[in-house]
Image: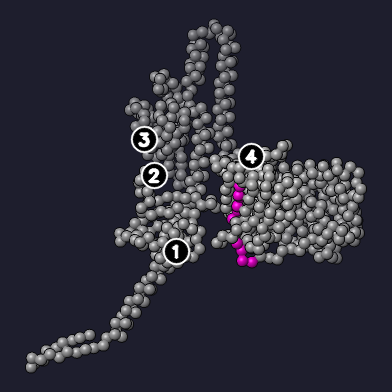
Amino acid sequence: QVSERPTREGGLVILYTDITEVKVSETMRREQALAQKSRLLQRAVDNLSQGVAMVSAEGALELWNRRFLELCGLAPIEAHRPFAEVMADSELKLLTPGTRDTKGRPVRELEQRLFDGRMLEIRTHALPTGGFVNTFTDITERYRHAEALRESERWIRLITDHVPALIAYVSADLTYEFTNKVYEEWYRWPSDGMLGQSLREVHSGEHWRQLEPYIDRALSGESVSFEMAERNHAGQQRYMLRSYVPNRQANGEVAGIFVLIQDITDRRRTAEALHQAYQNLEQRVRERTAELTSLNDQLLREIDERSHVEARLREAKREAELANLSKTKFLAAVSHDLLQPLNAARLFTSALLEQPAAPNGGLIRNISNSLEDVENLLGTLVDISKLDAGVIKPDIAPFAVSELLENLSTEFHQIAATEQLQLDFIPCSALVRSDIQLLARILRNLLTNAIRYTPQGRVLLGCRRRRQSLSIEVWDTGVGIPADKLEEIFQEFKRGEGVRPNQDRGLGLGLAIVEKIARMLGHRIQVTSRPGCGSRFAIEVPLARRAPKARAEPNTTELLLQRLQGARVWVLDNDTAICAGMRTLLEGWGCVVVTALSEEDLARQVDNFHAEADLLIADYHLDNGHTGIDVVATVNARRASPLPALMITANYSNELKQQVRELGHMLMHKPVRPMKLKTAMCHMLEHGMAG
């Protein structure tokens, strides 16, 4: 810093001062203040419920928050990256102040549905200094509410449009807010043309003066009905019965009026004709008795019909609310009642097949295969209904994908070989998060379709790692799918043309189940195909960092049979056929079996549960509202040491699965597969599982 001062003698004094430290200190204070403001701004932006992204005039992303990354499905990013490059990694469309629609008009906002079903609203706002700010809002709930309201309105309109009466609703200021089709046709208005119109303007002056006293009474809270002559659009005079019902709020205030108008011209004229006949034609009373009786019957039918219509209107809402409950009950009945005899039949055929030198072994095997086909058919139909009803709930957990894929490879290698196809499998060591049973159902359907629609060549099962997910893919060299059919194939009962003579084409539900399960799990399905060259189906599953160790391989059949020799097993099931089937199967394995149809029956046979035993197998659903869990608790309460319990059921709910797991029992679903039952029994006898 240089300072000059004149002296009295006319000279000049110049002072040189080093102010470097002062300047550096001021600069540091300004930078710290700026950094503090930046941190406060970032913290404020991060706490917004909307996603926010600020882009500079050069197109680089300068400021964003965590919500932006979540909604766009992006990993953490670096600053100053081009915004277009960042959005290329997301499934969202790029929106800037320069975006135009097909007609060249600027687009300032748009809505986009994500693959997991969520709906986002994206808005762009230009900045006066150049650049722009984009906001990203999750409007899924608002969108669903709007869809539900539209669906509700559609049902109301569908019902009221088929009622033979004029129905409308006007607000307290006498503005039309709803009219049915009959009302609009009567006044010759286009569809929804009356909405927003004033009731005073729709009716002529004279007509309005006749209606006004009754409308005033309705607005004051009184329900009124009256008859009135009116000319229709053709100039014909008709008699109308009008009813005005006030819509009262909780505070007693009238928010509007429900209007119901019925054409009673025929009834009115009939009454007038009867009155005239009684006054002027008394001598013809006897001759007209039959006709009057007929007219009276007609009037009664009209009254009865109107009563039925009103009853149907009252019942419509109640029936809609009970629909889902009825469907769920039906599914429970199907799962239990249809699978009961099928389970018994499978137990009998399995016992026959395991007998050495069984006569008619080929015939028994054919019966077993047919029962398996029926099981798969029923299972598919029940599963598609359960998915629609929301009965099935995913049990998400981490696991090694090799545990699933290696089993599928082994399972489908022989199936492919029988069709002269080559099945190739590329192992993968990744860990993923999903429901292993539901994911297996998806991949089984994809592999079955690949083999079904591949006349020759090979099928490939493998994986590709993405950034935060694993793409499990099934490739084939089959007939392929036309581009215009790629969306259609996921619809129910849509099947491709068979590629082999006498080929079972299935029900056309496989890919519908795949789509429903994938949507429930939040996994994205991708399909690419070239007709005549083959197809690729891929499902993206989130990666996991850790997973429990894979279970050890089960022992061979010979070792399992050795462990079951002499095992004392109690079987409880309220179905006689299942008891007989279980006895035949278990005794064939060398077990000593006691079967019972109820808790009381079992108590009588086993010294009130004090007899020696190694294992208890119980059906979950018993008679009189009792469950197998209740019986196991009663049995073990009376014993010095509790029995290991195996629960068998057709109930696939996660709640039951969790309850059985917490009690320390083992759960198995119907229809029971003998090898799986054998393995489970050996495991329980080894480890002594008990509740």
| Foreground residue among 184 and 430 | 430
Do labels 2 and 4 touch, CB within 8 Å?
Answer: no
Q: Earlier in the sequence, mark 2 or mark 3?
A: 2
Disc 3 + disc 4, Cβ < 8 Å: no
For label 3, the residue is 198
Helix, strand or loop at mark 1: loop
10 Å neighbourhood of mark 1: few (<14), some, or many (≥20)?
Answer: many
- Compared across the picture, whether 327 is left or right of 181 comes to right
Q: Earlier in the sequence, mark 3 or mark 4?
A: 3
Q: Which residue is mark 1?
A: 65
Q: Can the viewer see residue 655?
A: no
Q: Is residue 219 left or right of residue 589?
A: left
Indicate whether residue 537 is drawn in magenta.
yes
Q: Rounded to the nearest whole Å, what is the CA distance between mark 1 and mark 4?
A: 47 Å
C-alpha separation, residue under disc 2 versus residue under disc 4? 36 Å
Picture quarter with the C terminus: bottom right
- Name the residue type under label 3: Ser
Q: Main secondary structure of the magenta part?
A: strand
Q: Which quadrant of the figure has residue 486? A: top right
Going from N to C along the chain, the mark reached first, 3 or 1, is 1
Q: Residue at x 65, y 61 (%)?
A: 428
User: Circle 3 sits in a helix, a strand or a loop, which is it?
Assistant: loop
- Residue linked to disc 4: 496
Q: Nearer the viewer, mark 3 or mark 1?
A: 1
Depth check: 323 or 382 in front? 382
Q: Nearer the viewer, mark 1 or mark 4?
A: 4
